[in-house]
Amino acid sequence: MKSLFGKIFIIFLLLGCSGSEDDQSTDQNNTPSVNSLEMYVSSDEIIVGQSILFSVFDNNGKNRTTEAKFYVNESEIDGSSHTFNDIGTFDIYAKFQNIKSNTEQVVVNQVPIEYKQYVLVEDYTGTWCGYCTRVSYAIEQLKKQTNDAIVIAIHQGDPMQFGQESTLRSHFGVTGFPTAFIDRKARWTPPEPANLSEVIGKLSNKSYAALAMDSSLDGDMLTIKVKLKMGYNYKALKLGLYIVEDKLIYDQRNWTSYYQGDPIKNYEHNDVLRKSITGLLGDQIPSDQLGHDKEFEKEFQYVIPSEFNKDNIRMIAFVTEASKKETINVRSSKIGESQSFEK
């Protein structure tokens, strides 16, 4: 897409360059002739009913927008903007002095379907980390205010250490403990107990994807069906599935005033990341199964190790755009629960 920022850059480039008259073609009035056009669109992907602005510049850097004619799928339009009331892919170009510009494509999508938004909090922690109880306390307070915050505790250097924690820390740029991320996009600002609104505020965002899980247990074999409903024409998505465990009892160092004692004896650790069933950052969803109002399902099986307490196991599913780190939505489920999509 030829963006408006590119247009501005070209203008300054042309104005800043100098050269002899032989460097440019001229007409009989010694005016530089026009032999090519460059067209720009304000956006290359919109929702039906929205408008796009067009502009065009000649090879001399002169703005020809008011003089040019613009065409949408070969049909001339009035002016230099257009409201798209139909869904599809449209070819846009301009003409000036019988010279045709480059052709740009605009994708017009259906109105997105909105679903309930959950927020993901990932807590990088360890029993040895005396200041990590600051985040633990914030999470306790957060859970008192909402059930829609999904927490994953990623332990390092203790009996609950997650085997791939160093890979996660490297990928998300975690350099110290404690560190907590919100939706894998922004760090939860310390002191976290004073900034609960940073997490709760995310729940008012719009989500155009919904997750639901069904699961069953046969002996040690856990079968999980993860369902994803898409309310937007996403180009690429990844689906992730983690196993977490609650009610793990270990002493916890404490150098804060939020709790009494150091260490805190028999501290209950919850939301502990145990296993990534998919790839650590999720598995790519086939492109032919993506689209507005489409549903994707995938079944997973996992043998629960004997050292895990089945009664305390939960599954956490998340979805991200493949090229981005930020989670679009997330969902937690207990074993045996049958969930539906939530709007």
Image (spheres, grey):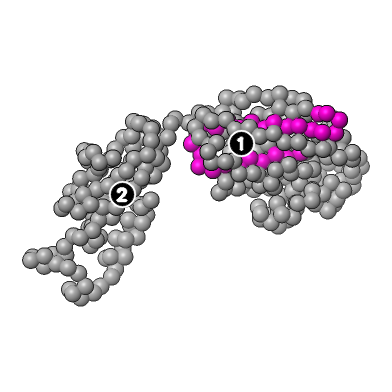
Q: Amino acid at mark 2?
A: Thr
Q: Amino acid at mark 1?
A: Asn
34 to 343, vertically: above or below: below
Residue drawn at x 16%, y 52% as measured from the top left:
98
Residue drawn at x 39%, y 40% as measured from the top left:
107
Q: Quadrant of residue 49?
A: top left
The residue under label 1 is 329
Tell me where residue 334 appears, x and y as whole percent: 76, 29
Residue placed most toward the observer, 311 or 193: 311
SS class of the residue under badge 2? loop
114 to 181, vertically: above or below: above
Magenta segment: 217-243
Residue 126, visible in the rendered structure: no
Quadrant where the C terminus lies?
top right
Residue drawn at x 29%, y 68% as measured from the top left:
16
Q: CA distance from mark 2 to mark 1?
A: 36 Å
The residue under label 2 is 103
